[in-house]
Amino acid sequence: MSNTAPPPLQGTHPKAARPWFKKKRWWLLIIVVFIIIVSPKNGASKNDVAATAPVATATAAAVETKAAAAAPAVVQTPTPPPAPVVPEVPVEYQSALSKAGSYSRTMHMSKAGIYDQLTSEYGEKFTPKAAQYAIDNLKVDYKANALEKAKSYQTTMSMSPAGIYDQLVSEYGEKFTPAEANWAVQHLGG
């Protein structure tokens, strides 16, 4: 019996005997270096690189997959969810909101009064949806509006508190809610 090793199978080479250029890891390294050198450096996105070199990116993805399997796991912080998409507000709705704000600031109107003025065929002629959008998004203190209107009635028309209250809640008058009108009359002073 001889102590010699059996001859290798035909067509196979031991790993140590293969030259460096026949080893897969060297070719993968060369491809990765080539991709890094060739890739655009001036703010190009992944889509630009993918469009210009689809074969290279596929190879790079394979290399990254192998590298990720061999590398220790890296904990990545989760990215925050994208901000909710706010639908664009139609111009008519924006105009109605702007006009409603103007009525509130200059004429101290009630919510119902502003809505009626916005939708009136003799007023602004906005659609009911646009007017409702304006009312829903208008940031107004209607009690303060009622107080300003009550002061106006008291000084210009010399009305009594009871008459002012009636005028503030009247469906033919200012259309404030009873709570708003009552608050305004209580805070009239003098």
Image: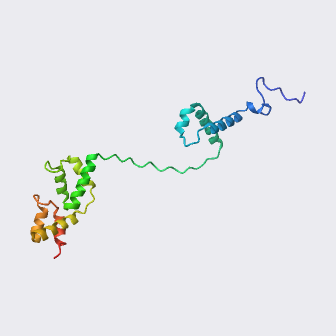
Q: How many marks?
A: 0
Q: Quadrant of residue 9?
A: top right
Residue 40 position (above or below residue 18) = below
Residue at 73% x, 32% y: name it. 23
Residue at 80% x, 26% y: name it. 8
Give the x, y percent position of residue 169. 13, 62
Give the x, y percent position of residue 60. 61, 36
Give the x, y percent position of residue 134. 25, 52
* Foreground of the two, 62 or 149: 149
Q: Quadrant of residue 21?
A: top right
> What is the quadrant of the N terminus in the image?
top right
Q: Is residue 6 left or right of residue 73?
A: right
Q: Colour scheme used in the picture?
A: rainbow
Give the x, y percent position of residue 163. 9, 68
> What is the quadrant of the C terminus in the image?
bottom left
Q: Is residue 22 left or right of residue 133?
A: right
Q: Is residue 102 left or right of residue 8?
A: left
Residue at 63% x, 39% y: name it. 36
